Amino acid sequence: MEYTEKIHAEGLLEIFSQATPCGSCPSQKMRERYDVEYWDGEKQGLEPQCDVCWDFIGGERWANCPCFAGNQERAAKATWLALEAKGYI
């Protein structure tokens, strides 16, 4: 199954309802919901979910995950603004 922006946004909204959103990965949350073990391309060593995540916030990678390297506030703000701009909230 392809990991899409829509699926990513669903996962983001779910993790933003938690006390610490940067403690979860939207891709992992959505694996459970859509009952998939791997997103398309993952078995080949690709990280399509990470590409979707970085494309979603429209930024250059500053770490493997936007929440890594002490950038949790920056990642949360960029993600929330992207959710608003794209009409998910």
Image (tube, rainbow, N blue to C red):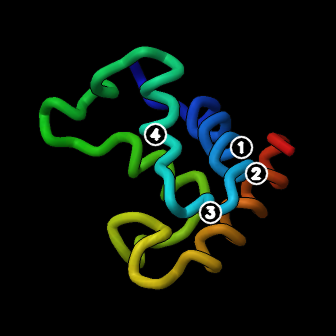
Q: Identify the amino acid type marked 3.
A: Thr
Above or below 71: residue 32:
above
Please report contact status of discs 1 and 2: CB closer than 8 Å, yes or no: yes
Tag 1 secondary structure:
helix
Residue 21: image quadrant is: bottom right
Instruction: State the separation of the CA atoms marked 3 and 2.
Output: 17 Å
Residue identified by numbered label 2: 83
Q: Which residue is mark 3?
A: 20
The local secondary structure at tag 2 comes to helix
Please name which of the two marks, 3 or 2, marks the residue nearer to the observer.
3
Q: Is residue 66 left or right of residue 78?
A: left
**Marker disc for residue 13:** 1
Q: Earlier in the sequence, mark 4 or mark 1?
A: 1
Which percent across, then down, holds residue 47? Answer: 29, 45
| Residue at the outermost left position | 44
Coordinates of residue 75 in the picture (x, y in percent)? 59, 71
Q: Residue at 33% of width from left, 27% of height from top? A: 39
> In terms of depth relative to the viewer, which is nearer, 19 or 77?
19
54 displayed left or right of 73: left
Q: Quadrant of residue 10?
A: top right
The tag on residue 27 is: 4
Tell me the SS state at disc 4.
helix
For disc 1, the neighbor class at 10 Å (few under 14, some 14 to 19, many from 20) is: some
Q: Amino acid at mark 2?
A: Leu
Amino acid at pointer 1: Leu
Q: Element type at marker 3?
A: loop
Q: CA distance from mark 1 to mark 3?
A: 12 Å
Spatial CA span between label 4 and label 2: 16 Å
Work out whether mark 4 precedes mark 3 in sequence or the reverse, and give the earlier one: 3
